[in-house]
Amino acid sequence: MLMTTTIVNHRWNELRTTIARKFYFATILQAIVSFSIFWGLVALHTPKPPSPKLYLPVAFQFGTLFLVLGSYFLHRAVQFVRLERQTLFRRSLVFALGCAILFVGIQSYGLWEFSNGVTGFRNTQTNVHGFTLVFVSLHAMHFIVAQSILMWVTLCAFADRYDHEYFWGVVFAAWVWHVLGIVWAVLLAVFGISIPV
C-alpha cells in the first residue's frame, strides 16, 4: 500500500512540471483569444455617445449569459467526475473554460464601452459612475483569478488527476465560479436600482 502511494505521488510530481509548462502557454493563448474578442467587438461596434446618466452596456448582459453557462458546465463537471464519466467531465470543463474566455472578452469590451460612454465621472471621486467602474473592474480581476484556477483544473483533468475518489480541485473551481456569479448578480441588481428610469 505504501509503495503504491509513493509511486502515485512520484508520478504526480513529474506531471505537475509538465502541467505547469502547459498552463503557461495555455494562459497566453487564453489571453490572446480574450483580447481578440475584445478588439473584434471594439472594431465592430461604436460605443454610445458620452452621457451624464449611468447606463450599463448590453455587453454586460451577454457576458452574464456566459457566466451562467459556465456555472452550469462546472456543476455538470462535478457531477460527471463523481460518477467517473471522464469524457463528459473533461468536455464540461472545456465548455466552462470556453465560457470563461468569452466572458472575459465580452466584459472587457463592456468595461471599455462603459468608461468611454460617461462624461465627467473621472472628475468626481464620489460620482456613481466611478464607483460602478471600480466595482466592475474588481469583479473582472477576481474572475481572471477564477479563470486561471479553472485552467489549472482542466489541465489536471486531462492528466488524469481527478476521479470519483479525489475531485476537490474541481469542486473548489466550481464554488469560486458560483460565488463570483452571485457577486455579479448582486452588482447588476444594485446597478439596476441605481439607474434612473
Image: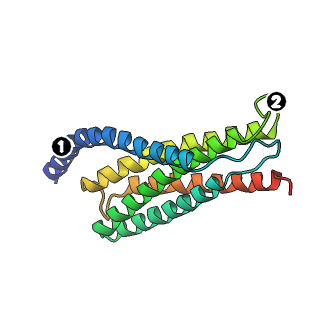
Numbered circle sitting on residue 78? none
Q: Give whichever of discs 1 and 2 has the lower sequence position.
A: 1
Examine the image and state in which quarter residue 51 appears.
top right
Numbered circle sitting on residue 124? 2
Residue farthest right in this picture: 197
Residue 18 versus residue 110: which sits nearer the camera? Answer: 110
Residue hosting label 1: 10
Residue 60 versus residue 4: which sits nearer the camera? Answer: 60
Residue 186 versus residue 13: which sits nearer the camera? Answer: 186
Examine the image and state in which quarter residue 49 appears.
top right
Could you say where residue 2 lies in the image, as x and y percent from the top left? 17, 50
CA separation in Å, label 1 and label 2: 57 Å
Q: Amino acid at mark 1?
A: His
Q: Is residue 189 left or right of residue 1?
A: right
The residue shown at (42%, 55%) is: 97
The residue shown at (24%, 38%) is: 17
The residue shown at (53%, 59%) is: 66
Answer above or below: position of 174 versus 47.
Answer: below
Q: How many marks?
A: 2
Q: Amino acid at mark 2?
A: Thr
Q: Is residue 44 left or right of residue 154?
A: right
Could you say where residue 23 lies in the image, as x and y percent from the top left? 32, 42
Answer above or below: position of 13 versus 197.
Answer: above
Within-10-Å neighbours for mark 1: few <14, some 14–19, many 20+:
few
Could you say where residue 126 lies in the image, as x and y percent from the top left? 82, 33
Answer above or below: position of 62 versus 84.
Answer: above
Q: Kindly state the secondary structure of the residue where label 1 is placed.
A: helix
